[in-house]
Amino acid sequence: MPSKSGVFSEASRLLVLHDFDLPKAGQFLDTIHRYHGPDSEVREKLKAFGRDLQKSQVLHEKLTGYVMECQADYFGSQECAFNQDRQHASFDEYFQHWFYSQPDYVEKSARSYFQKWITQPDKLKIKTGEIDWRF
């Protein structure tokens, strides 16, 4: 039986192992005015990697795939917030809102685990069909 900590830890391990948490080499870095997370090219690779895991027959891998896809959206939302000088949520809070903004997107067997692990927020801060965090 998969555990929340095991799934999220595996997603983090794979994120770092494949350098999905870094901008691509040669990306211009401005220490004050530039977002330093993965750029859109890297985020799309991360999203594809996560979606491939979601096709697995192994539930732990499937769950990990959804977390990884959410990480890609998180980085995109974080970049948008940085560019607009807005605050952004932690990944755990972002995942909670990401999942409940589109719970039917997650396949049924995986959905039941996320619903056990993560409570539904009173007010969603991500609109259905979008990825940007809104305070």
Image (spheres, rainbow, N blue to C red):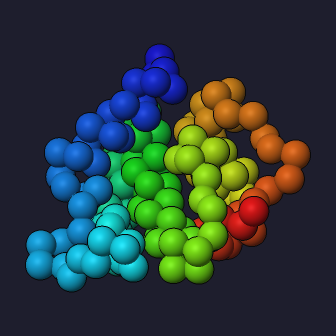
Q: In this view, does 38 lie to the left or right of 63?
A: left
Residue at (63%, 62%) from the top-left corner? 87
Residue 131, quarter of picture: bottom right
Residue 23 visible? The answer is: yes
Q: In this view, does 87 lie to the left or right of 58?
A: right
Q: Nearer the viewer, residue 60 or 21?
A: 21
Residue at (67%, 72%) from the top-left corner? 129
Farthest residue in the left direction?
26
Q: Nearer the viewer, residue 17 or 48?
A: 17
Residue 105, quarter of picture: bottom right
Vertical arrangement, residue 115 with respect to residue 65, above or below: above
Q: In this view, does 108 lie to the left or right of 46?
A: right
Residue 59, quarter of picture: top left
Vertical arrangement, residue 126 with respect to residue 16, above or below: below
Q: Is residue 107 left or right of residue 124?
A: left
Query: Residue 85 location in percent, x, y?
Result: 58, 74
Residue at (29%, 56%) from the top-left corner? 21
Residue 112 visible? The answer is: no
Query: Residue 3 location in percent, x, y?
Result: 48, 21
Q: Nearer the viewer, residue 46 or 51?
A: 46
Residue at (32%, 67%) from the top-left corner? 36
Farthest residue in the front direction?
32
Farthest residue in the right direction?
122
Vertical arrangement, residue 91 with respect to residue 102, above or below: above
Vertical arrangement, residue 96 with respect to residue 71, above or below: above
Quarter of the image containing the C terminus? bottom right
Farthest residue in the top direction?
1
Number of marks drawn: 0
Query: Residue 119 location in percent, x, y?
Result: 75, 34
Q: Which of 103 and 4 is in front in this view?
A: 4
